[in-house]
Image (cartoon, rainbow, N blue to C red):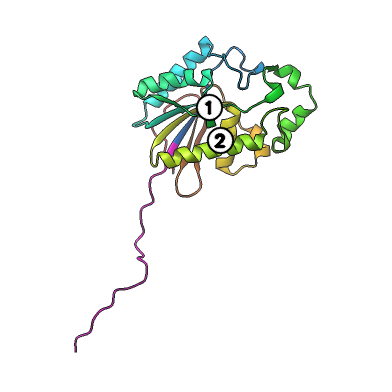
Amino acid sequence: MATTRRASTRPSTRSRKPPPATLVLFVRHGQTATTGTTLPGRAPGLHLADAGREQAAAAAGRVAELARVDAIYASPLERARETAAPIAAARHLKVTVERGLVECDFGEWTGGELKQLMKLPEWRTVQSYPSGFRFPGGESFVEMQDRMVGTVQRLVVAHPGAVVVCVSHADTIKAAVAHAVGTHLDLFQRIVISPCSITAVAYGTGTPVVLTVNSTGGSLAQLKAS
């Protein structure tokens, strides 16, 4: 008597290849006339200095070495859009303004001189306990990080397996890096993000993989998760 083989209901043990990660290149805007002396925040009208334009051109040359770039986003502030422009031109892409990449809202501290702000008793909190600080009339560091991380996650979903450039600001990029490496926000001030530096993070199905932080020279062509 012939028997009928029943199809196995057990899931296949054959491993499936995970989808490719999305590579996000975080680029801080170039130097301005106030870099290192003033907290400009979201105040409009601040443009790149001559040195900043040179830095942006150099960053564009480094990004141009990559085999592909699929999208370029920038904070709406002038200094970020001016940094993104040569990168986009080198790749024949347009810059999409993304509000979520904007600088932290420093509220009443906007436009303040750093040497004066450093004398305030709140400055120690900014440096050692940022998760517990809100800028008077502005944003908290926690809100800034949540906004930045949420924006990046949304862009990763929109560009699966792609290479995406995000031109933003020092504190926002530092917050994104801290989240990616699993470091508490209270330690994010230990991260340095220089003008026009490039930070690369691969976002896949697992935890993010940080490939480079604050890179200001050399080739980006070999960036990949190990």
Quadrant for residue 222, please give it: top left
x 52%, y 18%: residue: 78
Q: Nearer the viewer, residue 213 or 99?
A: 99
Q: Is residue 20 inside the magenta stretch?
A: yes
Crowd tier of the residue under label 1, counting other residues whose Cα lies within 10 Å: few below 14, some 14–19, many 20 or above: many
Binning the other alpha carbons within 10 Å of mark 2 as few (below 14), some (14 to 19) or many (20 upward) gives many
Q: Residue at x 38, y 45 (%)?
A: 20
Image: magenta residue range: 1-23
Horizontal and vertical percent position of residue 139: 66, 31
Q: Secondary structure at mark 2?
A: helix
Is any atom of residue 220 visible in this view?
A: no
Mark 2 to mark 1: distance in Å? 10 Å
Farthest-out residue, top: 50
Q: Extreme right residue here? A: 121
Give SS at disc 1. strand
Report the side of 184 relative to 169 (left or right). right
Q: Residue at x 79, y 24 (%)?
A: 120
Residue 188 shows up from this direction: yes
Is residue 59 a member of the stretch shown in magenta? no
Q: Are the residues at dot 2 and dot 1 in contact (C-beta closer than 8 Å)?
A: yes
Question: How many numbered discs?
Answer: 2
Q: Locate residue 173 relative to residue 58 in the image: left or right.
A: right
Tell me the amino acid under the disc marked 2.
Met
Residue beneath label 2, please?
148
Query: Callout 1, which amino acid?
Result: Ser
Q: Quadrant of the C terminus?
A: top left
Which of the marked residues, 2 or 1, is nearer the chain's N terminus? 2
- According to the image, label 1 marks what residue? 168
